[in-house]
């Protein structure tokens, strides 16, 4: 299986390479085979990309917003037309089941391009009446923005970052995760085909050092990172010391609370979506599933039945529902957490093994896993695992579960399942999390802000909030009379 792109990087509307850069192998997680080899960016490549962005940005920012938006909407149409081809690239890069990538990944990027392409023309400044004189505000581009992506939603991440940035008149240099370099290159080609002027969306590959070089570059005005909390702290410290704008979308250990009056099948569906989709590699996953005592045993029994039916296997088979983890390191990390759960005294209720799949013996597969009898202090209930491992905890009442749900350094997401809607809103209002769901889980439409409280991040992606965060506000005072000068 090969998925070699034309070159490693995409700069100024063209594929470029520099073979001096460290080799960057692309591994298909289902088989462990190398399907492409790219090169990490050298300092020269970083300079070329930043310079292309710097040169292209001012003219782009002077276009009417509706003209910029038109190009983004055209690119959204191309993404949709090529959905099947892009979904296949994403599956080869990430190992995620094709039945997911066909509906979730390029489609979500297309949604972002369409939404921001349409919204930007209406994203206007304010008029301020000063009783004669007046003021108005302008929303101006920041300049060159850097996007740094994680590996779980590569093309979505590239779309969520580039669409609001470009819509507001910025240029972007995007560095995908070193684990998933392919689909951002496809997006770059599509932008060019849609008519985006050269230099406005550039892709450079590389490991953390390339991310650091981009984030600290003097030309760069803003950095938007999706990644883990430790990486976020490093990048935020760097950007803070250089007075750059920053958005941080980081990790979580989110609570999903199921009251005993909840619709059982819906609550289980939500918990499974929030733990097993993308093989559990989703930042907002509700990995601490709190179930009220009276419902607990029935919940676990039915959850187990439904989990047993999950089809693990060949990610390119449309019947497959769960693929492998992204790489060996992540696989080993998840397996070690399963071991920790057992030694800490949780009950391994289901899964926890490595399925043996014919033809995929070297893939990074792990069964969907359910722990019960989990207590709040166990490491599997406190640390982000980023794999298909659900912890079920039981609780008695509302006040208790709110306290326990909030007892975490993270604050990305939270969910509540109940038929008692006043209670749902009351509980959500108390939960310390930036992105919440009532009677569903993990849906992130582009119209809704997405981001975290506490250690889970700063800033928001999606919605008009993202346009605010990819722009800076200028206020203009306009005198309509004489200057009252004491001199
Ligand atoms: P990671 O932190 O290892 O890497 C993220 C990105 O940062 C990669 O592109 C990496 O090369 C780059 N990077 C690493 N060190 C850097 C440095 N010093 N300077 C600049 N860039 C650097 O994360 P990951 O393993 O790719 O992704 C998994 C993590 O991402 C999980 O914690 C998950 O919760 C989080 N995540 C968050 C969101 C969100 O929107 N909140 C979405 C997806 C994933």
Image: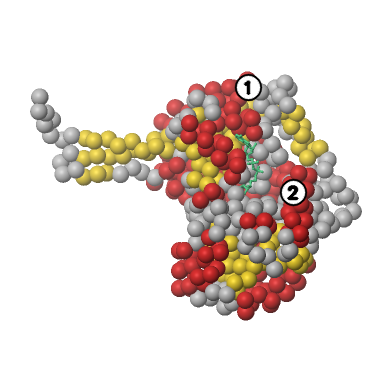
Identify residue for label 2.
333
Along the horizontal axis of the image, is 31 left or right of 215? right
Q: Is residue 220 above or below residue 369?
A: above
* Residue visible at 50% across and 76% down in the picture: 420
Which x, y percent locates residue 123? 39, 45
Sequence-earlier tag: 1 or 2: 1
Disc tally is: 2
Along the horizontal axis of the image, is 379 left or right of 174? right
Quadrant location of ligand 1?
top right
Using the image as rendered, state which of residue 354 and residue 171 is in the foreground: 354
* Residue visible at 46% across and 36% down in the picture: 245
Instruction: Check the picture and name the quadrant holding the C terminus.
Output: top left
Using the image as rendered, state which of residue 110 and residue 33 is in the foreground: 33
Q: Is residue 342 above or below residue 251?
A: below
Q: Secondary structure at mark 2?
A: helix
- Nearer the observer, disc 1 or disc 2? 2
Q: Which image quadrant is residue 258 in?
A: bottom right
Along the horizontal axis of the image, is 273 left or right of 477? right
Which x, y percent locates residue 486? 9, 28
* Residue visible at 64% across and 68% down in the picture: 393
Q: Which image quadrant is residue 199 in?
A: top right
Judge the density around disc 2: few (<14), some (14-19), many (≥20) Cα neighbours within 10 Å. some
Question: Could you tell me if residue 332 is visible in this image?
Answer: yes
Instruction: Check the picture and name the quadrant holding the N terminus.
Output: top right
Identify residue for label 1.
43
Question: Could you tell me if residue 221 is visible in this image?
Answer: no
- Mark 1–mark 2 distance (CA, rounded to whole Å): 32 Å
* Residue sitting farthest toward the right: 358
Using the image as rendered, state which of residue 210 and residue 165 is in the foreground: 210
Which x, y percent locates residue 227? 61, 43
* Residue visible at 45% across and 73% down in the picture: 422
Q: Is residue 286 above or below residue 127?
A: below
């Amino acid at each position: 299986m090969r998925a070699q792109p034309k070159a490693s990087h995409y700069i100024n509307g063209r594929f470029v390479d520099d073979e001096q850069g460290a080799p960057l192998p692309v591994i298909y997680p289902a088989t462990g085979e190398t399907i492409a080899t790219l090169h990490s960016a050298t300092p020269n490549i970083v300079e070329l990309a930043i310079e292309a962005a710097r040169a292209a940005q001012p003219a782009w920012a002077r276009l009417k917003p509706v003209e910029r938006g038109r190009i983004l909407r055209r690119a959204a149409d191309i993404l949709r037309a090529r959905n099947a081809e892009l979904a296949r690239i994403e599956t080869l890069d990430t190992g995620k089941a094709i039945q997911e990538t066909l509906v979730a990944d390029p489609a979500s990027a297309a949604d972002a391009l369409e939404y921001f392409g349409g919204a930007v023309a209406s994203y206007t400044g304010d008029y301020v009446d000063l009783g004669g004189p007046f003021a108005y505000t302008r929303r101006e581009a920041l300049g060159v923005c850097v996007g740094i992506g994680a590996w779980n939603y590569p093309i979505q991440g590239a779309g969520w970052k580039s669409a609001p940035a470009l819509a507001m008149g910025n240029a972007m240099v995007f560095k995908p995760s070193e684990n998933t370099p392919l689909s951002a290159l496809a997006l770059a080609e599509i932008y060019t085909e849609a008519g985006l002027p050269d230099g406005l969306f550039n892709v450079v590959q590389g490991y953390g050092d390339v991310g650091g070089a981009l984030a600290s570059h003097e030309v760069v005005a803003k950095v938007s990172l999706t990644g883990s909390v430790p990486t976020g702290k490093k990048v935020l410290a760097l950007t803070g010391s250089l007075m750059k704008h920053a958005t941080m979308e980081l990790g979580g250990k989110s609570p999903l609370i199921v009251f005993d009056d909840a619709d059982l099948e819906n609550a289980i569906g939500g918990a499974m979506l929030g733990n097993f989709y993308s093989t559990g590699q989703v930042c907002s996953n509700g990995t601490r599933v709190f179930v009220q005592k009276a419902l607990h045993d029935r919940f676990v029994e039915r959850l187990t039945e439904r989990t047993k039916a999950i089809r693990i296997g060949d990610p390119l088979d449309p019947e497959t529902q769960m693929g492998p983890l992204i790489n060996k390191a992540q696989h080993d990390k998840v397996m070690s957490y399963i071991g920790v759960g057992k030694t800490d005294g949780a009950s391994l209720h289901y899964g926890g093994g490595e399925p043996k799949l014919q033809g995929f013996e070297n893939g990074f597969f792990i069964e969907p896993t359910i722990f019960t009898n989990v207590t709040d202090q166990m490491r599997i209930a406190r640390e982000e695992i980023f794999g298909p491992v659900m912890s079920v905890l039981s609780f008695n009442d509302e006040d208790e579960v709110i306290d326990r749900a909030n007892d975490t350094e993270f604050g990305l997401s939270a969910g509540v399942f109940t038929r008692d809607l006043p209670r749902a809103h009351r509980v959500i209002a108390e939960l310390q999390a930036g992105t919440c769901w009532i009677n569903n889980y993990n849906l992130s439409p582009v119209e809704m802000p997405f981001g975290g409280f506490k250690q889970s991040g700063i800033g928001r992606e999606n919605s008009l909030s993202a346009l605010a965060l990819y722009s800076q506000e200028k206020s203009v005072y306009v005198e309509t009379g004489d200057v009252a000068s004491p001199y």
